[in-house]
Amino acid sequence: MKHEAILDYYSVNGELRSTGETEIFDRIGGGAIYEVVKLIDGVPLFFEEHMARMRRSAALLGASLDTREADILTDIRRLSEKNRCRHINVKLVSAHPDGEDLFLIYFIKSEYPGPEAYARGVHTILFSGERENPHIKTLAGSFRQRVEKARRETGAYEALLVDGDGYISEGTRSNIFFLRETGICTPPAGTVLLGVTRGQVVDICEGLSIPVTEQPLCADDLKTLKGAFITGTTVDVLPIASIGEIQVPSVSAPAIQSIIQVFREKMRADIRRRGGDPTRIDSESDRSLSPRRPPGCPG
């Protein structure tokens, strides 16, 4: 497993370790399951939803997740304090090398979109490929390096996966929504990794009386779109400006802007519920993470 823990400390089964101690990462293979949770003002956003998905992934692999949520919350809080960082992505990893139960918690570098990305939308590309098992979030990823290479070469923020039948399934690190004349469509739940933000957006659309249909979109139909956006822990709800050579007027679509506004309100409510400062959301898009010490985390 790649050693990707940044800052000064990470946690193994509740024990703090220096990020200079990397041996344990070499013992963890691709069968581990993980979740990435956004920390804002020390609050892990939508924590219960992330843990529910992690437990579902474990169950699908015939494993169990015995670490208590209260203990995980305590360890995240302690890690935040020791690293002097309250605004960052935290990764939770459950692994069983040689029959030993390991639960790792550590901070990771993440590619946060800046304010311009939300104002103008991002560029995406199409990429042929599918997840081996769309319902399990594991560390295995046979074509991850090829995707990252294609993104770098084209300047794309995200790559949208296209299956063998020509249908768009999801982003490599996000879920996808398309705005059409009749409402919003998104790939069926049975064919994609069900993101926590995706579930929040579906609920928001219901509250806003925006019809949502779960159906695949053929790549040939992209020119008919009225808008599109991706969702995920790192990006929240992010408009798409282009898919390959096709321009998409997402940022001018009132429905998409309404969804973004309500989602941010839900984020604020979740932070407030755990005693954090919800106004910190407004400064989140102004930061990007450096390999060692993110802005807002004193060095």
Image (spheres, rainbow, N blue to C red):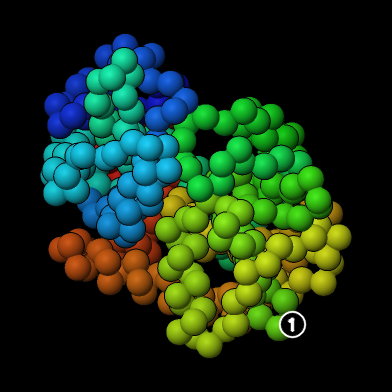
Image quadrant where residue 180 sits: bottom right
Q: In the rendered view, does 202 fall on the left or right side of 65?
A: right
Instruction: For mark 1, give the secondary structure.
Output: loop
Q: In the rendered view, does 95 fall on the left or right side of 13?
A: right
Which residue is at the far front?
Answer: 62
What residue sits right under mark 1 in the picture? Answer: 181
At x 24%, y 26%, the residue is 101
Residue 219 in the image: state x and y as whole percent: 81, 57
Label 1 neighbour load within 10 Å: few <14, some 14-19, many 20+: few
Look at label 1 and name its amino acid: Glu
At x 57%, y 57%, the residue is 190
Which residue is at the far bottom?
Answer: 209
Q: Is 185 rendered above or below residue 142?
A: below
Q: Is residue 20 visible?
A: no
**Residue 271 or 41: which is nearer the viewer?**
271
Residue 80 in the image: state x and y as whole percent: 20, 41
**Residue 191 or 126: which is nearer the viewer?**
191
At x 45%, y 84%, the residue is 207
